[in-house]
Every structure is written in structure tokens, then in C-alpha cells.
Image (spheres, rainbow, N blue to C red):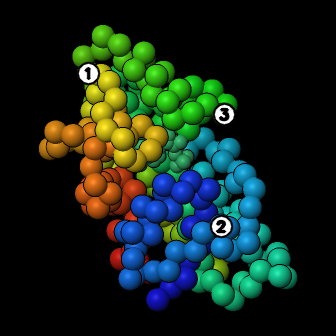
Amino acid sequence: MKRLIFATNNLHKLEEVRAALAGRAEVVSLAEAGLEGEIPETADTLEGNARQKAGWVWDKICESETRNREAYDGVFADDTGLEVEALGGAPGVYSARYAGEHCSFDDNIDKLLVSLDGVENRRARFRTVICLMEDGEERLFEGAVEGRILTERYGQGGFGYDPVFMPDRFAVSFAEMPLEVKNRISHRGRAVEKLAEAI
Ligand code: IMP
């Protein structure tokens, strides 16, 4: 079974991806790999950010004499954006900082609900790009889920925009679903499935 570092500081994502890859790949967190610090994320596309994040971690592993490069088969990173049709695809690649630098998930949801106040077209999609880097070679995997933005928050689970996103063919938000259900249909779940098939 491959041993891969997941380049994220988001513990929700780590839990989701570990559950999705259980029995198929060993997912090592940054802390377990002895890495810390803010991972740079300055590209203007999801693909660019995913490559940048995976590359940053891979370089750190290869540069260091104390971290055992041989212990890992590779690194992967994901980048996700919420693309809202009525907002011309915003917040997109800027989803984490939609309400400003260092804003909270709640600040972002508040801004989104205000931006869509009175707007009838609530169509939106989450899109994830995963970059897998093994021996400096990169591969990209994409997953998306279509749905709509609700007019208020529903549910306590998940993270980010989950309480206001309702995927098509469901009558509940992502935050109201058990993790296994979200993982089966979500943007990241679909991208992770492609990653799992490739490794
Ligand atoms: P990131 O840059 O991939 O961490 O994602 C950007 C932002 O998108 C995050 O800060 C979250 O607000 C949001 N996001 C990413 N994945 C999800 C998800 O699965 N559900 C809800 N929001 C998410």
C-alpha cells in the first residue's frame, strides 16, 4: 500500500480523505511527517494551487536530511473552489478568503448569503483539483458536484460552505449528511476516487 503525505493543515479534509482512502493508501498528515507552517497558495487557478502546495511539501521532504524521503511514495494536495453561477463563478479559487484575509467560515457564508440576497438563480458547484507528486512527476485529478446555495444555514457537520450547499438530488445540505454520504458524492470524494484508481 502506498504511503502518501497529504499537504493540508485542514483537519476536516484530512479526516474526509483518510476515510475515503482507507485500506487503499496510507495518508500521512503534515504533522506526522514533521512539517509545519503555512503552505503557499498564491496561484490564480485551482490547478495552480494544488501543484504549488504539493510541490512545496515535496521540496521540503527532499531538502531535509532528517525527514526520511524514502519513507514516502509521494505527496498530494487538493484545492477547492465554490463556483456560483449568478456570481460569474465567484468566489472560485478565492473561496477561502472570500470575506477577506484571515476570515472565518462563518464570515464567508455571511458574505455569500448577502451577495445572493433576492437572487433567484442559486446554481453552484464545488470543484476540487488534486495534484499527486511522485518522484517529481505530477498528475492531476478533478472532481465536481453540482447543487444550489440555500438561503440560510442547515446542519452542524462538515466545514466551510457545507451548511448552505445542497447537492442536486438531495433534500439536505452537506452539513446535514453523514461523512460517508458526503464523501461518496462530493467534489473531493470524486477527485479522491480518481486518485485511488491511479495509485
Ligand atoms: P481550499 O483552498 O481547498 O482549502 O478550499 C477553499 C475554501 O473552500 C475552504 O476554506 C472552504 O471554505 C471551502 N471548501 C473546501 N472544501 C469544502 C467542502 O468540502 N465543503 C465546504 N466548503 C469547502
Judge whether 160 appears above or below 14 on screen.
Answer: above
How far across and how far down the image is residue 22, in percent? Answer: 39, 77
Pointer 2: residues within 10 angstroms few (<14), some, or many (20+)? some
Image side of residue 13 versus residue 157, left or right: right
What is the spatial separation of the Cα atoms under label 2 and label 1, in whole angstroms?
40 Å
The residue nearer to you, when weighing 118 against 107, is 107
What is the spatial separation of the Cα atoms under label 1 and label 3, in whole angstroms?
29 Å
The C terminus is located in which quarter? bottom left
The secondary structure type at the circle numbered 3 is loop
Q: Which residue is mark 2?
A: 30
Residue 134 appears anywhere in the view: no
In terms of sequence position, does the residue under pointer 2 or pointer 1 come before the other? Answer: 2
Residue furthest to the front in view is: 156
Q: Is ligand 1 within 8 Å of the beta carbon of the residue shown at mark 1? A: no
Q: Quadrant of residue 148?
A: top left
Pointer 3: residues within 10 angstroms few (<14), some, or many (20+)? few
Q: Which residue is mark 1?
A: 121
Q: Which residue is mark 3?
A: 102
Residue at 48% across / 55% down in the picture? 12
